[in-house]
Amino acid sequence: MSKRLDLPLAHAAEDRFLCIEKVARRYDCSERHIRRLVDVGTFPTPQRFGRLLRWNIDQLASWENSGCPAIRKISDSKSKGRQNG
């Protein structure tokens, strides 16, 4: 009987978090592009579950509804260094 109680919770967690494959499909781009966007700070960062990375679907929806703003700002010194080098 305890197994039946565990199943809805497992499905609820699967519905709340997306793997990179599903995130890439959601935004019609490659998985590598999602990783690049996270690296430069223009996409929400995933949550880590052991070795797994998952995106919270509510966080993605909130980010979309706010106009997809940059997650973190690039400092002037970093952007100047990239332009010169």
Image (spheres, rainbow, N blue to C red):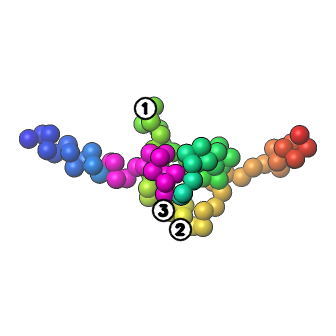
Q: Quickly name the residue at label 1.
A: 50
**Mark 2 near mark 1, Cβ–Cβ under 8 Å?**
no
Local packing at callout 2 (Cα closer than 10 Å; few below 14, some 14-19, many 20+) is few
Horizontal and vertical percent position of residue 6: 20, 43
- Image quadrant occupied by the C terminus: top right
Q: Quickly name the residue at label 3.
A: 61
Tag 1: residue type? Answer: Gly
Near-viewer residue (3 or 77): 3
Q: Quick one: label 2 or label 1, which is nearer the N terminus? A: 1
Q: Quick one: label 1 or label 3, which is nearer the N terminus? A: 1
* Element carrying mark 3: helix
**Mark 2 near mark 3, Cβ–Cβ under 8 Å?**
yes
Tag 2: residue type? Answer: Asn
* Element carrying mark 1: loop
Horizontal and vertical percent position of residue 47: 48, 43
Q: Quickly name the residue at label 2.
A: 65
Instruction: Judge left or right: residue 44 versus residue 55.
Output: right
Instruction: Please state the total of marks drawn on the protein image.
Output: 3
Q: Main secondary structure of the magenta part?
A: helix
Question: On screen, 42 above or below 39?
Answer: below
Residue found at x 86% / y 42%: 81
Name, please, the residue furthest toward the right: 84
In the rendered image, residue 10 lying in the magenta stretch gets the answer no
Local packing at callout 3 (Cα closer than 10 Å; few below 14, some 14-19, many 20+) is few
Give the CA separation, mark 1 to mark 3.
24 Å
Local packing at callout 1 (Cα closer than 10 Å; few below 14, some 14-19, many 20+) is few
